[in-house]
Image (spheres, rainbow, N blue to C red):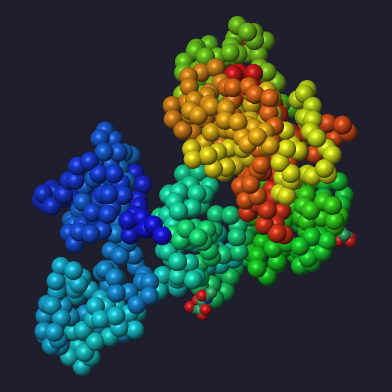
Amino acid sequence: QAYRSPLNDFQRSEGRELVPTSWNSNLVQMLPNLNLEECASRCSQSLDCRAFNYETRPTVSCKHLPWVADRRNAEVKRNVNCDLYEKKVYVRQCIVGKGEDYRGKVFTTKSGLTCQQWWSKFPHDHWWTPTASNGLELNYCRNPDGDNIGPWCYTTDPERRYESCNIPQCKDEVCITCNGEDYRGQVDHTATGKECQRWDQQHPHQHIYQPEKYPDKSLDDNYCRNPDASPVPWCYTTDPLVERENCNISKCPEVPVEKRQRSSFTTNCFRGRGEDYRGKVNETLSGIPCQRWNAQFPHEHPFHPNIYECKGLEENYCRNPDGSEAPWCFTSAPEMRTALCLQIKRCEDDIEAEDCYQENGKNYRGIVHKTRKGVTCQRWNVNTPHRTKINPLTHPEANLTENYCRNPDGDQHGPWCYTTDPKTEFDYCAIKQCGMNLFLFTQSTFSECGQRDDRPQRILRIVNGIPGNSPWTVSLRDRKGNHFCGGSLVYSRWVISTKQCFSSWRVLLGQSDQGPIEVDRSPSLCRLPGRRRAAGWGASLLGPPELYDIFLIFVEAIIKTMVVAVCLQKDYGGPLACRNSDCWVLEGVIIPMRRCGHPGQPNIFIRVSVYVDWIKKVMEMA
Ligand SMILES: *[C@@H]1O[C@H](CO)[C@@H](O)[C@H](O)[C@H]1NC(C)=O
Ligand SMILES: *[C@@H]1O[C@H](CO)[C@@H](O)[C@H](O)[C@H]1NC(C)=O
Ligand SMILES: *[C@@H]1O[C@H](CO)[C@@H](O)[C@H](O)[C@H]1NC(C)=O
């Protein structure tokens, strides 16, 4: 049975409050002790409610209002403790279907005639009577009789009795170019007509695209979006039996010129993740020629140049059509599906830093004292908010002056500092290496060698792998015990996984033939190293700086581990281990770029070797 959240009727504005002008503040209705969905449900059912403020601090409060934002009755103000929810039908400028529920404020017809007031019988006599429930307000266009022409009105022109107002369909209101990754329109149904699930909810489908984790993807309400470089915008559906479906949104008639010929295109180097790289490198780092994008051999794949029309998928050039970490290609070697083209250099002007450092920055003596996220550094000689395990006394040679960024421990990522944010112990600074490529590779330095039973077959991927053949694989489970992500045990008490996996979780290590052994039932399973226990589920996970997509988890209980079966669809965070002479090396952490285990779709991995220094430091500081 489909569960429909009452919140589906609303559009949310985070950190906003609708404040009535003083003369009508008595029209605000305060409802005590309601949770968010109850507050929404009551508002949905009430004819007098068009929006509500849901405040969470200092106390939970649900306030119903009879208007949406307008300058006359109420104004939207910032309030970090409050979210504003407005009924979609009142704020939306477009219609779904015939638009019987349209409650917008358009009052002119398609030929420009002003609408007649619904309560008036002049110039046109009619039998409609405005009521609280039929929406016949003032002279706004409405569709009370479900006419095929959509919202309409009687006109003030005696010669013209009524006319359509041409309110656009939501699927036509905002058209999409390319794969619609920048679509921010308001279609909330799939092509087959299923209602979309809200991105900020985890039912009926549990998923990783929580809006707060992907701030740049605008995962608003339950609107169709394309956060994962799919061919078109899509959504999870409210049908428990159908996880996700594509939405049918009109294509813009022509790809705008600036989309095809962006000045940000580069040819000899790449910026950011290289999505705009349009150069002609056509082989992998190790010299294997790339497969042509328009070929399906040796590797079958979904990146048809005509489906991904704005991604520059020409010839067999390295490209980044899916938001991977750098340009990549399918290779012409049957045994190697994809490879990053890491020989392409990062553009020198990609470095926005105010300052730069040489080599690893051990000799950096500048005065930058901010992290990459803009957080001010903590002074090296104080112990709040973080206890400085590295300080002027322990490292007299390192010039630990004031709160300046330094690199006393020779961190490969360069100068860093303890931060003044209690939630982030340390972070790297807003300084880059002088004119250097950001990709630095070092050999993994873990001394303990991964061992596994190698008899069945050599499997590099977990898909179709046999549980039990990778003793370092870990299953991350939600509170109900459902597996949702993978991880790898990288050291006796440490698990590595990807940050997209965490909202609520616990770690299970277990033996495949006995079923999983639960390490710990409580959220305190994970904790910040050497510091207080995590306050709540995932609330204060030990996380690396935002730039990194991997997480280390501290596992309190130590258990001789064996593998747990890793579910095909959900092995994000799981390992890509490769054999290196007689040792298994954890090369990659699976990140949710595309759907895992999909026929013909490669997975993308974080290169663990890049983070070895960071991992070591986090573990040492624990
Ligand atoms: C999408 O919409 C177009 C135009 O409204 C329609 O012709 C087409 O059949 C629709 N496609 C699907 C899959 O529903
Ligand atoms: C790669 O590009 C070079 C120069 O553009 C060309 O000569 C070569 O034939 C290409 N190789 C393959 C395998 O396409
Ligand atoms: C750091 O170096 C600067 C200039 O090289 C010097 O003036 C300062 O005293 C040094 N500070 C420490 C704590 O060593």
- Depth order, front residue of 408/454: 454
Q: Indicate the position of residue 457 as horizontal and vertical percent values.
A: 83, 44
* Residue 414 falls left or right of residue 539: right
Farthest residue, direction front: 514
Count of marks placed on residues: 0
Residue 236 sits above or below residue 356 on the image: below
Relative side of 560 to 444, left or right: left
Residue 531 appearing in the image: yes
In the rendered image, the residue lying farthest to the bottom is: 159
User: Height in image: 573 above or below 87?
Assistant: above
**Which of these two is toward me, 163 or 171?**
171
At a point 53% along the width and 11% down the height, the residue shown is: 381
Q: Residue at x 47, y 58 (%)?
A: 240
Residue at point 15% right, 81% down?
128
- Percent position (x, y) of residue 224? 48, 61
Residue sitting nearer the eye, 53 or 490: 490
- Which residue is pictured at 44% across the width and 57% down the height? 197
